[in-house]
Image (cartoon, rainbow, N blue to C red):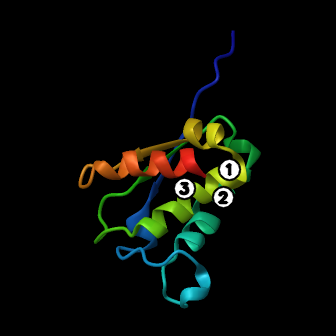
């Protein structure tokens, strides 16, 4: 019997920016926006059929901090585009430095 192996894809926010910034791209060329992070780093992973059985691990550690609008745009934006259930099942969060962010993000996904 064949077993489906889940592949883990790790996305480290600090590789995008240690200073995640605004919600939208149009708020400045170097805004490090949530929209840009979502569109460049996460949406391609959701849209690639080779990743259908993959888990996307988003590591939030290593940055200076997050604005609520940045987090909502990334994770709420994913939920608005792909649905809450898919986002909950595919995204796993790591935040050892600020563990409360995980609960905040789950609320953004739920309320999207």
Most extreme residue toward the top is 1
How many numbered marks appear?
3
Looking at the rendering, in which quadrant would you find the N terminus? top right
Image position, residue 76 (x, y; %): 57, 56
Q: Distance between the residues labelled 3 and 1?
A: 12 Å
Label 2: which residue?
A: 43
Q: Looking at the rendered structure, which numbered label has been put on residue 86?
A: none
- Are circles 3 and 2 on residues that touch, CB within 8 Å? no
Residue drawn at x 64%, y 23% is 4
Neighbour class for label 3 at 10 Å: few (<14), some, many (≥20)?
A: many
Q: Residue 12 vs residue 7: left or right?
A: left
Residue 75, disc = 3
Residues at marks 2 and 1 touching, judged by CB atoms closer than 8 Å: yes
Lower position in the chain sequence, tag 3 or tag 1: 1
Tell me residue 49's x, y (percent): 76, 44
Side of 14 relative to 77 (left or right): left
Left or right? Give the position of 14 relative to 30.
left
- Quadrant position of residue 15: bottom left
Label 3 SS? helix
**Which badge, 3 or 2, comes first in the chain's sequence?**
2
The residue that label 1 is drawn on is 46
Q: Which of marks 3 and 2 is in front?
A: 3
Secondary structure at badge 2 equals helix
Residue 21 position (above or below residue 95): below
The foreground one among 5 and 104 is: 104
Label 1: element kind? helix
């Amino acid at each position: 019997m064949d077993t489906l192996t889940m592949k883990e894809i790790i996305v480290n926010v600090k590789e995008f920016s240690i200073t995640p910034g605004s919600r939208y791209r149009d708020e400045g060329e170097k805004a490090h926006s949530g929209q840009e992070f979502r569109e460049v780093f996460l949406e391609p992973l959701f849209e690639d059929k080779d990743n259908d059985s993959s888990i996307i691990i988003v590591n939030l550690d290593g940055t200076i901090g997050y604005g609520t609008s940045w987090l909502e745009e990334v994770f709420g934006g994913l939920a608005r585009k792909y649905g809450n259930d898919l986002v909950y099942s595919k995204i796993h969060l790591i935040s050892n430095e600020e563990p409360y962010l995980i609960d905040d993000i789950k609320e953004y996904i739920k309320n999207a």
